[in-house]
């Protein structure tokens, strides 16, 4: 009977494959005929390349968001994604009005070494005006082969004169670990922002350096918040720092046998005993979830934060014609407990339905090595859940409208130096200076104003204007008076963003990370857990209980 079933299954597979091959040949023939007829008969000239790109994008859109076509023109972006490096001047840019400005030069790379600063408007590149150009267009012009020269004319913040710099491009490598150090006398911290090449070695070296420099080190906080992942093999190497040799970290299961693999730790772990806390949030995804999930499954450390993104799919990059590539989803991955944490179902669609979240009824329970219950179907649930703190609207609008960015530029223009990133603070007098800088220019619309506007429109439409118009005018007047107090009401969180932005002007990415840790409630909780061995162990053995407010 087993042999009969095998033959039936194999025969069915061949038939399905033959049917697919016929449909592919048929579709390609139709596609080619349509393109030729458009080229011959359409009322205007067509751009076959653009039409082809649109057709490919539309086709892949029906699959999943991670299966994408990478044309030769976008290969620089792919190299940046895969390797964390590219040829260029080394600066982040953003659009502000008619111009693209430098938002942050990378420390030690050509833009910073040449004297370019945050806030510089890019006016001309290699003789071509940059006015009105998009950030992607400017980025393309600034990137290029290492060793080549690009002429960049900028207008420094607060100046009315242009200056031209001839900058030699270099290979720009974005660090996987922008910062590591101590967050208390005996607790270390490592920030990882991507899983590009050598991420495993970078984290390992950071950890070993902390152990070497601090003999009394009693815990590590590993920050994976907003880390969208990257290379799977680097995730395995990072887990291997704290998980012993020959332990399963992740297994991939694909439709075809060649895409099914098991990934075990290959080396002796650096440290299997030191208390470990991993910080995650809703933007922690993919390789980050493999690391945090495997640490949780082996009861090797405590996870703190909010539920992770839930990307349990694996992609492979396949070379195709004309120096382009196809990044295609080939498998699901499963962490040591056996769970797949994929949150969105892109595959089992019926009647043309779109992607759907895995329903609660299909979520399954699994066990960690020590017997704790964990679940699949929607990311990694932290051992200690903490509410994500969101900035008030006024703070968010100050940031979005670049008031904080520009004030930091002004401060840098008038101050040659500041104290270290861990000690610099925003005084009340400096906050008052910021309020004067903002003045009456700052305009933002509150939800309350939107409600009053809709009420006024409804009253006009229904004939109640004369009855409530004076009341609405009074409400608007009172609201304007209250809005003037908004900066003071949100003083502390505005100070926090000001401090981080100003520190970044002097200490770049390392300083930004270090300064952001000062008021971080999740860092504070992680320190508290490491300093309380009884609580730490109770979490790992499953006896810890947390209430709805995120407290013990």
Image (cartoon, rainbow, N blue to C red):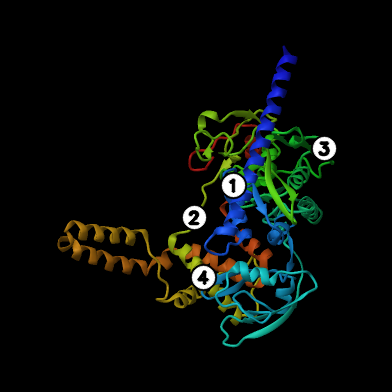
**Visible residue check, residue 338:** no
Q: Earlier in the sequence, mark 4 or mark 1?
A: 1
Marks 1 and 2 in Cβ contact (< 8 Å): no
Marks 4 and 1 in Cβ contact (< 8 Å): no
Measure the C-alpha gap from mark 3 to mark 1: 43 Å
- What residue did someone put label 2 on? 390
Badge 3, how many Cα within 10 Å: few under 14, some, many 20+?
A: some
- What residue did someone put label 4 on? 402
Farthest-out residue, top: 1
| Element assignment for label 1 | helix
Q: Nearer the viewer, residue 61 or 104?
A: 61
| Element assignment for label 4 | loop
Measure the C-alpha gap from mark 4 to mark 2: 18 Å
**Visible residue check, residue 103:** yes
Measure the C-alpha gap from mark 4 to mark 3: 49 Å
- What residue did someone put label 3 on? 245
Above/below status of 473 relative to 262: below
Q: Nearer the viewer, residue 98 or 163?
A: 98
Q: Earlier in the sequence, mark 4 or mark 3?
A: 3
Question: Horizontally, is 477 left or right of 81 in the view?
Answer: left
Q: Quadrant of the N terminus?
A: top right
């Amino acid at each position: 009977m087993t042999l009969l079933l095998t033959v039936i299954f194999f025969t069915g597979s061949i038939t399905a494959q033959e049917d697919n091959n016929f449909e592919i040949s048929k579709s390609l023939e139709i596609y080619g005929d349509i393109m030729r007829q458009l080229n011959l008969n359409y009322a205007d000239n067509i751009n076959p390349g653009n039409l082809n790109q649109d057709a490919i994008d539309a086709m892949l859109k029906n699959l999943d968001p991670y299966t994408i076509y990478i044309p030769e023109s976008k290969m620089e972006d792919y190299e940046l994604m895969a390797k964390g490096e590219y040829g260029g001047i080394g600066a982040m840019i953003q659009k502000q009005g008619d111009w693209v400005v430098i938002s942050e030069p990378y420390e030690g790379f050509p833009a910073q070494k040449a004297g370019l600063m945050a806030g510089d408007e890019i006016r001309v590149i290699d003789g071509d005006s940059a006015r009105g150009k998009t950030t992607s267009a400017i980025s393309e012009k600034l990137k290029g082969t290492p060793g080549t020269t690009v002429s960049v004319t900028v207008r420094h913040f607060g100046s009315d004169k242009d200056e031209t710099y001839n900058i030699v491009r270099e290979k720009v490598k974005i660090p996987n670990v922008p910062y590591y150090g101590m967050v208390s006398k005996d607790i270390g911290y490592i920030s990882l922002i991507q899983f590009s090449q050598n991420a495993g070695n970078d984290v390992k070296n950071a950890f070993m350096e902390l152990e070497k420099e601090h003999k009394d080190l009693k815990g590590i906080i590993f920050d994976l918040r907003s880390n969208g992942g990257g290379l799977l093999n680097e995730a395995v190497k990072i887990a291997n720092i704290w998980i012993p040799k020959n332990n399963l970290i992740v297994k991939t299961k694909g439709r075809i046998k060649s895409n099914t693999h098991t990934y075990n730790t290959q080396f002796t772990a650096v440290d299997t005993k030191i208390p470990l806390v991993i910080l995650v949030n809703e933007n922690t995804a993919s390789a980050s979830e493999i690391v945090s999930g495997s640490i949780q499954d082996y009861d090797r450390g405590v996870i703190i934060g909010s539920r992770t993104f839930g990307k349990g799919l694996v992609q492979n990059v396949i070379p195709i014609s004309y120096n382009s590539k196809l990044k295609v989803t080939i498998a699901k991955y499963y962490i040591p407990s056996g769970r797949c944490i994929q949150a969105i179902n892109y595959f089992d669609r019926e009647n043309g339905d779109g992607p759907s979240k895995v329903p609660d009824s299909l979520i399954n329970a699994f066990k960690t090595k020590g017997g704790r219950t964990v679940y699949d179907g929607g990311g990694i649930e932290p051992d200690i859940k903490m509410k994500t703190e969101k900035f008030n609207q006024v703070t968010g609008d100050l940031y979005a409208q670049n008031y904080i960015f520009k004030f930091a530029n002004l401060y840098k223009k008038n101050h040659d130096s500041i104290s270290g990133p861990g000690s610099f603070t925003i005084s009340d007098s400096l906050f008052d200076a910021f309020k004067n800088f903002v003045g009456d220019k700052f305009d933002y619309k509150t939800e309350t104003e939107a409600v009053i506007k809709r009420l006024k429109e409804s009253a006009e439409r229904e004939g109640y204007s004369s009855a409530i118009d004076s009341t609405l005018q009074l409400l608007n007047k009172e609201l304007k008076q209250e809005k003037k107090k908004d900066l003071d009401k949100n003083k502390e969180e505005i100070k926090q963003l000001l401090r981080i932005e100003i520190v970044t002007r002097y200490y770049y990415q390392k300083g930004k990370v270090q300064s952001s840790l000062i008021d971080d409630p999740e860092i504070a909780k992680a320190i508290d857990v490491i300093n309380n061995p009884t609580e730490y162990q109770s979490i790992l053995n499953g006896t810890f209980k947390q209430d709805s407010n995120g407290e013990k």
